[in-house]
Image: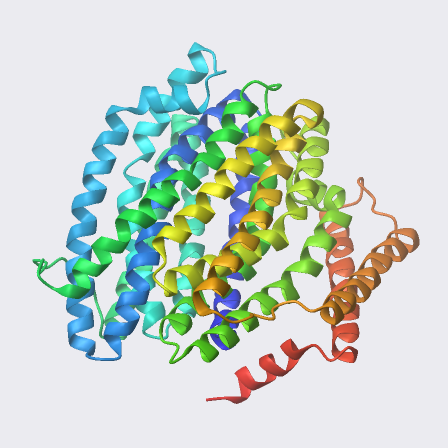
């Protein structure tokens, strides 16, 4: 699991860096304006269906069943994947048609505070981008197949091609079509994302193509049976970005955009570490031979996630001003956008450890085929996010909208742990008081390193890009090095896992 996670991190690193470059390009063209607010609302709507069908319910239902089918017969497992592809194509085409038709109503729900011009722009952009769902859903199915077959690096690297295509095409399209050019670049990137993995299927001798599905196949019926309750739960989960956009539309102009910019930075450690670990652990949990192996794998996955996420969270919070200035401040991205993005980023990063634990624990519920409990955890997360957003938005503005999801994910992760423990009937032993104390010591060292570094070498906003980038890289290297030293001295088991992962063939 650790070895696969590390390979996914390596592949994801490039795609996340290009993703930030993509946001830098967009920010330079459009800044934090009504055009970007409309684009972000439209992009969020097209991603709601993507996260529900592709990255959510489809992955949760398909990967455990496909992984188990592989242990019996590779050919039958591939036939199952190809039949699933046919069903997926039919479903996504229907959803795309409905999304295009109901775009005006969807925009009204998500951004009720938009004026007529912004509403019309968001509707048009939504209709342009909804076909993105077809490409990205097929990509998610292909990724699930490749991950189950033991391939993690190429699926993690494929989003880099999507971002690269966007970066190449966006200036050309935006110069001619304005903000609609960004929508066209999104479609081009989604197609590149899918094709990268689909072509790699030839090398794995597992290429996917639509075939007539055998509706009597028990495995296909099981996937469809699991899909509906997972889809119901994840459809609730998609309320979270809607809540943020709805309340943000009542705040000052640009609030939705700064929340989106800070979220793009949050996605760097989230995708690089958390998603990589959760994707790697799902096939392992699905093939666990007994409860003891299941608990051991889950415990190591959660601890490994915290091992890499906790210092990343603290580090980004400590240098949020400098990091946002380096990445975004140029062109139309001015002082207010800098300050607002920095503060929302810091509050968002407070919730990253909770997001990490919750994401891994949800994979455990999927592997145990517990759709009812997964639905309850998701419903609790959404309800908590909604309540906390309404409570925090008035005293804290957009900062409250950034903080609320992290608190909700932390609480829902604890609820998920309760369900897993009740199902297995044994303690999980994930966090001990000794381990918590060791983490506090290591994180205190990281925080002290930032303070000393900033005192010895203050960040110069007027310096050249190279000097500013060197400042950020320097503080990251210092903190990572000191964290490594302290955790090794404290005997953290993650260093042993990493060593074993690279020694083992």
Measured from the top left, where is residue 116 in percent x and y? 42, 10
Measured from the top left, where is residue 59 in percent x and y? 34, 57
Q: Residue at x 60, y 84 (%)?
A: 499
Between 84 and 153, the residue placed more toward the observer is 84
Question: In this rendering, would 359 be left or right of 144?
Answer: right
Residue 91, compared with residue 357, is above or below; it is above
Q: Residue at x 39, y 23 (%)?
A: 107
Can residue 17 be seen in this snapshot? no
Question: In this rendering, would 93 be left or right of 377?
Answer: left
Q: Residue at x 49, y 60 (%)?
A: 361
Measured from the top left, where is residue 364 in percent x and y? 44, 63
Tell me which colouring the rendered structure shows: rainbow
Residue 115, compared with residue 330, is above or below; it is above
Residue 222, compared with residue 351, is above or below; it is below
Residue found at the far top of this picture:
116
Can residue 463 be seen in this snapshot? yes
Between 194 and 260, the residue placed more toward the observer is 260
Residue 406, compared with residue 12, is above or below; it is above
Q: Residue at x 55, y 24 (%)?
A: 247
Measured from the top left, where is residue 56 in percent x and y? 37, 51
Q: Quadrant of residue 94?
A: top left
- The number of callouts visible is 0
Q: Quadrant of residue 122?
A: top left
């Amino acid at each position: 699991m650790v070895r696969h996670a590390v390979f996914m991190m390596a592949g994801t690193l490039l795609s996340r860096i290009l993703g930030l470059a993509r946001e830098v390009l967009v920010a330079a063209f459009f800044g934090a304006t009504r055009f970007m607010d409309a684009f972000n609302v439209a992009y969020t709507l097209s991603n709601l269906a993507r996260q529900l069908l592709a990255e959510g319910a489809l992955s949760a239902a398909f990967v455990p069943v496909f992984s188990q089918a592989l242990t019996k017969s590779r050919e039958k497992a591939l036939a199952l994947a190809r039949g699933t592809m046919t069903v997926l194509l039919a479903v996504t085409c229907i959803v795309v048609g409905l999304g295009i038709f109901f775009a005006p109503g969807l925009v009204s729900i998500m951004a009720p505070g938009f004026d007529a011009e912004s509403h019309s722009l968001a509707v048009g952009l939504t209709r342009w981008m909804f076909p993105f769902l077809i490409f990205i859903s097929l990509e998610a199915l292909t990724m699930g197949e490749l991950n189950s077959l033991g391939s993690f690096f190429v699926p993690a690297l494929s989003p880099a091609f999507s971002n690269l295509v966007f970066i190449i095409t966006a200036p050309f399209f935006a110069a001619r079509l304005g903000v609609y050019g960004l929508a066209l670049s999104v479609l081009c990137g989604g197609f590149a994302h899918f094709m990268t993995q689909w072509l790699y299927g030839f090398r794995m001798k597992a290429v996917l193509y639509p075939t007539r599905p055998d509706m009597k196949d028990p495995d296909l019926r099981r996937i469809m049976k699991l899909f509906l309750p997972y889809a119901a739960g994840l459809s609730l989960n998609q309320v979270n970005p809607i809540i943020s956009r709805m309340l943000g539309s009542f705040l000052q102009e640009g609030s939705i955009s700064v929340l989106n910019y800070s979220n793009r930075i949050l996605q760097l450690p989230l995708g690089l570490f958390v998603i990589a670990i959760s994707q790697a652990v799902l096939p392992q949990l699905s093939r666990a031979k007994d409860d003891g192996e299941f608990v051991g794998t889950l415990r190591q996955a959660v601890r490994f996630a915290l091992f890499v996420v906790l210092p990343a969270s603290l580090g980004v919070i400590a240098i949020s001003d400098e990091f946002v200035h380096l990445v975004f401040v140029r062109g139309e991205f001015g002082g207010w956008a800098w300050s607002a993005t920095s503060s929302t980023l810091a509050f968002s990063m407070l919730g990253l450890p909770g997001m990490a634990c919750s994401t891994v624990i949800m994979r455990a519920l999927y592997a145990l085929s517990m759709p009812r409990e997964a639905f309850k955890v998701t419903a609790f997360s959404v309800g908590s996010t909604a309540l906390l957003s309404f409570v925090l938005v008035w005293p804290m503005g957009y900062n409250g909208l950034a903080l609320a999801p992290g608190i909700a994910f932390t609480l829902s992760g604890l609820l998920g742990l309760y369900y897993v423990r009740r199902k297995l009937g044994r303690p999980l032993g994930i966090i001990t008081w000794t381990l918590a104390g060791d983490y506090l010591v290591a994180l205190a060292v990281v925080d002290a390193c930032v303070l000393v570094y900033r005192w010895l070498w203050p960040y110069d906003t007027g310096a050249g890009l190279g000097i500013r980038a060197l400042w950020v890289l320097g503080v990251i290297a210092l903190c990572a090095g000191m964290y490594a030293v302290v955790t090794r001295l404290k005997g953290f088991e993650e260093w042993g896992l990493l060593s074993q992962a690279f020694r083992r063939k």
